[in-house]
Image (spheres, rainbow, N blue to C red):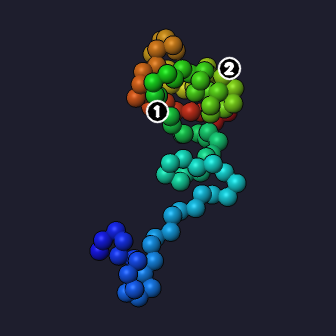
């Protein structure tokens, strides 16, 4: 079957409908609805991130970076300013 075979007059073939986003909420590229951070949510560090930036984006308050650091001390280490790209951090429920 080719890409445009649905245009032929063979029966009532129709293209697949795209997934509609959840009502009232933003979605990511894959159609997953945004949700507030909950226990066990994770975040993968990308270039340019800091704990305060992650806290601001997920909690709406950059001063909550310390809660993220406390939940991830074993991964981050002794210096909260030295997070690395690719680290998967747990975002605690506040």
Q: Which residue is denoted by mark 1 in the rendering? A: 44
Question: 23 or 62, which lies in front?
Answer: 23
The residue lying at 63 percent from left, 48 percent from top is: 26
Whole-percent x, y for residue 88 in the image: 44, 31
Measured along the vertical axis of the image, is residue 61 above or below residue 29? above
Element on which disc 1 rests: strand
Distance Cα–Cα, label 1 vs label 2? 19 Å
Whole-percent x, y for residue 52 in the image: 60, 21
Element on which disc 2 rests: helix
Q: How many marks?
A: 2
Measured along the vertical axis of the image, is residue 31 above or below residue 4? above
Q: Quadrant of the C terminus?
A: top right
The residue lying at 69 percent from left, 30 percent from top is: 60
State which tag comes first along the sequence, 1 or 2: 1
* Image disc number at residue 63: 2
Q: Quadrant of the N terminus?
A: bottom left
Q: Along the horizontal axis of the image, is 59 left or right of 41?
A: right
The furthest residue to the top: 79
Question: 64 or 2, which lies in front?
Answer: 2
């Amino acid at each position: 079957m080719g890409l445009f075979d649905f245009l032929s007059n063979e029966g009532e073939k129709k293209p697949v409908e795209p997934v509609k986003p959840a009502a009232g909420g933003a979605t990511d590229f894959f159609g997953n609805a945004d949700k507030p951070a909950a226990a066990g949510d994770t975040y993968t560090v990308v270039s340019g991130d800091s704990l305060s930036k992650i806290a601001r984006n997920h909690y709406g308050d950059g001063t909550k970076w310390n809660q993220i650091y406390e939940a991830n001390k074993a991964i981050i280490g002794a210096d909260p300013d030295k997070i690395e790209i690719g680290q998967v951090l747990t975002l605690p429920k506040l």
